[in-house]
Amino acid sequence: MRGERFESPEAAVETFRTLISEITALEWKKCFENWFERMQKCIDLKGEYFKKR
């Protein structure tokens, strides 16, 4: 949706809903599994997963 322009907020919401509905259950599962792995890595490293500059 990046860069798209919509006639109304409702049109943007409808486009969002359409795109979200096209994501398969397997894709959602992978997304959340990856997210949980990253969060666990952060927990295991006591926040050092994010490098300080």
Image (tube, grey):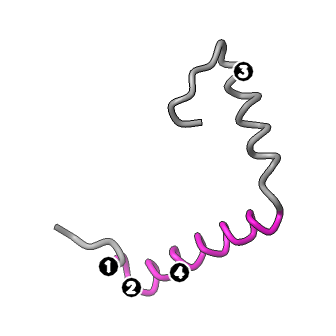
Q: Which is nearer the eye, 30 or 22?
A: 22
Q: Which is nearer the eye, 2 or 50?
A: 2
Whether the residues at callouts 4 and 2 have beta carbons within 8 Å, the answer is no
Alpha carbon separation for disc pair 4 and 2:
8 Å
Alpha carbon separation for disc pair 4 and 3:
37 Å
Q: Position of residue 23 (x, y in %)?
A: 77, 54
Whether the residues at callouts 1 and 4 have beta carbons within 8 Å, the answer is no
Please give the range of residues in magenta: 25-48
- Asked if the stretch drawn in magenta spans residue 38, the answer is yes
Alpha carbon separation for disc pair 1 and 4:
12 Å
Task: Return the mark for residue 48.
Answer: 1
Looking at this view, name the residue that lies furthest to the left: 53
Whether the residues at callouts 1 and 2 have beta carbons within 8 Å, the answer is yes
Q: Amino acid at mark 3?
A: Ala
Name the residue beneath numbered marker 3.
Answer: 11
Q: Nearer the observer, disc 3 or disc 2?
A: 3
Q: Amino acid at mark 2?
A: Leu
Name the residue beneath numbered marker 2.
Answer: 45
Q: Amino acid at mark 4?
A: Gln
Residue shown at 66% from the left, 75% from the top:
33
Whether the residues at callouts 4 and 3 have beta carbons within 8 Å, the answer is no
